[in-house]
């Protein structure tokens, strides 16, 4: 395979998956990791991708996918993460669930026990509407139709009125150096505020999110206490986060 052909295939793969690792590309194209690193350096200089820790990420413009599309992506993995996350919820907790599909799967599994749930998600609120013992507090704001959630200054101002002991937050990208990020800037700002008002932060992220850097940064990894991910996440993917003394749980 010609060098130019390999590099074109690398660009296509990065754009399709969002992020790839050097080791993965080395095996796929049957060349050394050093060769792949040179390819990535050249492609980054041409502004065709962005190098990341151990790989590369796409620089295509990120937009928030409609809820119905996200709802059917990596369903088994998200359900496993959600089921594990529910085990960290105890009676009388005050928790935040964001507007992610993983948070919705988590809401579906919450038992009907005394809890207070703060959310900006219409889907989460509707799921919990019939749980008699759960107090649901929704924050208003500007409705994002794609995600069926509320964002904006009014949302953040309302969040400032509360304090919770646990927040369950998802994202589009998880990077040991760049932190956690999201495709939508307004969602990222809401998640920042959710983290600010929480004692403990649980990051819900399936294996496809690791090593990826999305458009809008939410926060650094130092603010995350526990990462809950699925069984497909490799030891290599989570090693850097364990070195940051973050608990990483694989469901």
Image (cartoon, rainbow, N blue to C red):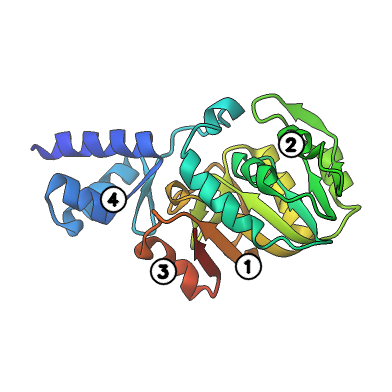
Question: In the rendered structure, which disc, 3 or 2, sits on the residue that comes first in sequence?
Answer: 2
Residue farthest to the left, as pictured: 1
Per the image, the residue denoted by label 4 is 41
Return the x and y of residue 132 as percentages of the image width and height. Answer: 86, 44
Answer with left or right where residue 76 lies relative to residue 27.
Answer: right
Q: Nearer the viewer, mark 3 or mark 4?
A: 3
Per the image, the residue denoted by label 2 is 127
Q: CA distance from mark 3 to mark 1?
A: 15 Å
Residue 211 visible, this orientation: yes
Per the image, the residue denoted by label 3 is 239
Q: Nearer the viewer, mark 3 or mark 2?
A: 2
Question: In the rendered structure, which disc, 1 or 2, sits on the residue that comes first in sequence?
Answer: 2
Q: CA distance from mark 3 to mark 2?
A: 35 Å
Residue 47 visible, this orientation: no
Q: Give the class, few, some or many, for how many residues have Cα within 10 Å of label 4's Cα (few <14, many ≥20).
A: some
Question: In what element is the residue under mark 2?
Answer: helix
Picture quadrant where residue 246 is located: bottom right
Return the x and y of residue 119 as percentages of the image width and height. Answer: 78, 44
In the rendered image of this protein, does residue 142 appear above or below residue 85?
above
Question: In the rendered structure, which disc, 1 or 4, sits on the residue that comes first in sequence?
Answer: 4
Q: Are marks 1 and 2 in contact (CB under 8 Å)?
A: no
> For residue 225, which numbered disc appears in the image?
1
Picture quadrant where residue 147 is located: top right
Question: In the rendered structure, which disc, 3 or 1, sits on the residue that comes first in sequence?
Answer: 1
Residue farthest to the right, as pictured: 161
Return the x and y of residue 251 as percentages of the image width and height. Answer: 49, 58
Question: In what element is the residue under mark 3?
Answer: helix
Q: Quadrant of the N terminus?
A: top left
Return the x and y of residue 70 as percentages of the image width and height. Answer: 54, 33
In the rendered image of this protein, does residue 165 appear above or below residue 73?
below
Q: Are marks 2 and 4 in contact (CB under 8 Å)?
A: no
């Amino acid at each position: 395979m010609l060098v130019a052909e390999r590099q074109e295939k690398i660009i296509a793969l990065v754009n399709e998956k969002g992020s790839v690792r050097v080791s993965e590309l080395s095996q796929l194209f049957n060349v050394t990791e050093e060769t792949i690193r040179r390819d990535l350096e050249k492609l980054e200089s041409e502004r065709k991708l962005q190098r990341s820790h151990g790989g590369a990420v796409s620089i295509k413009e990120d937009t928030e996918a409609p809820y119905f599309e996200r709802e059917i992506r990596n369903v088994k993995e998200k359900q496993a993460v959600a089921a594990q996350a529910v085990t960290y919820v105890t009676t009388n907790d005050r928790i935040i669930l964001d507007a992610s599909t993983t948070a919705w799967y988590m809401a579906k599994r919450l038992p009907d026990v005394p809890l207070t749930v703060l959310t900006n998600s219409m889907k989460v609120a509707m799921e919990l509407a019939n749980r008699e013992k759960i107090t649901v507090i929704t924050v208003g704001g500007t409705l994002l139709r794609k995600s069926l959630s509320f964002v904006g200054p009014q949302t953040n101002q309302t969040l400032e009125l509360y304090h919770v002991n646990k927040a369950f937050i998802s994202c589009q990208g998880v990077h040991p150096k760049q932190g956690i990020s999201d495709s939508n800037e307004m969602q990222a700002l809401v998640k920042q505020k959710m983290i600010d008002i929480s004692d403990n932060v649980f990051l819900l992220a399936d294996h496809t999110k690791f090593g990826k850097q999305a458009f809008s940064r939410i926060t650094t990894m130092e603010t995350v206490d526990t990462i809950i991910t699925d069984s497909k996440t490799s030891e290599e993917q989570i090693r850097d986060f364990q070195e940051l003394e973050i608990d990483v749980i694989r469901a």
